[in-house]
Image (cartoon, rainbow, N blue to C red):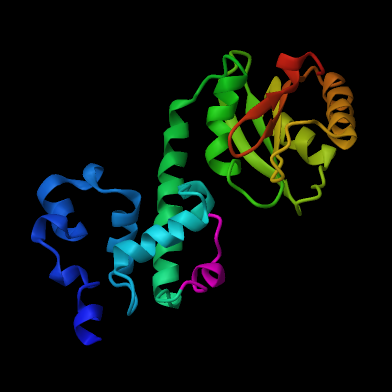
Amino acid sequence: MQEKTATFSIKNWADDDRPREKLVLKGSPVLSDAELIAILIGSGNKKESAVELSKRILASVGHNLNELGKLSVNQLMKFKGIGEAKAVTIAAALEVGRRRRGEDTVKVTKIKGSRDAFDLLYPMMGELQHEEFWIVYLNNSNKVMHKSQLSKGGITGTLVDVRLVLKQALELGAVGIILAHNHPSGTLRPSTADKQITEKLKTATEALDIKILDHLILTQNDYLSFADQGIL
């Protein structure tokens, strides 16, 4: 039995097949997702190597790293061989990856259309499991002056304080605003509440010569633009 167990150990693999050695020899891009995760967890369990365990974890989320990033530490610990330390390591690594993508948004300095707004906001909102409402403030050249989370709520909705939006816009000297919130459910259909808050903010900002340029609904894979759909 011990001999069988030993064959599952990465230590018994050829050097070229070991994830760590493979990364050193060939570089990280050649490694599969499972091999990269195997490096993070270091070891598997009595029946699986680290790579095999990683493959099973990935299979549980449809081999989707975005879905893997949504798993909590407790959910990861349900896999035999994944203790708290390994679960925390996986969660931390995926969060680093998410933040790295977020840094790319500094390249989006001017909003020319809804896609630019989506690219700017997706790293902060696209993968969340709760709903958040964000505001992007623009100058008269549609350059991004500031972006901030206005509110954070549960999956069913979030609260929006119109006064805070106006206060921030006046302090920044913004002349344009883009509204955005995410739908963790994945639906891109705007709700009645979504339309009502858009109209409420539009009425309030027009009195101050500030224009609502768009309202985006973001999901993990797509977005809807009120402006593009002609419902702004």
Give the magenta-colored segment's residue range: 69-79
Look at the image and tell me whether residue 92 can be seen. Answer: no
Is residue 77 something one can see in this rendering?
Answer: yes
Is residue 69 toward the left or the right of residue 28 in the image? right
Counting from the top left corner in percent of width and height, residue 197 is at 86, 33
Q: Quadrant of residue 101?
A: top left
Left or right for 215, reference 138:
right
* Residue ID at (41%, 53%): 96
Q: How many marks?
A: 0
In front: 12, or 95?
12
Magenta stretch holds residue 72: yes
Q: Residue extending furthest bottom?
A: 2
The relative height of residue 198 versus residue 50 in the rendered view (above or below) is: above
Any magenta on residue 107? no
Give the percent coordinates (x, y) of residue 23: 18, 52
Residue occupying image coordinates x 69% and y 52%: 130
Above or below, 5 against 27 in this view is below
Image quadrant in which the N terminus is located: bottom left
Tell me which secondary structure the magenta stretch mostly adopts: loop
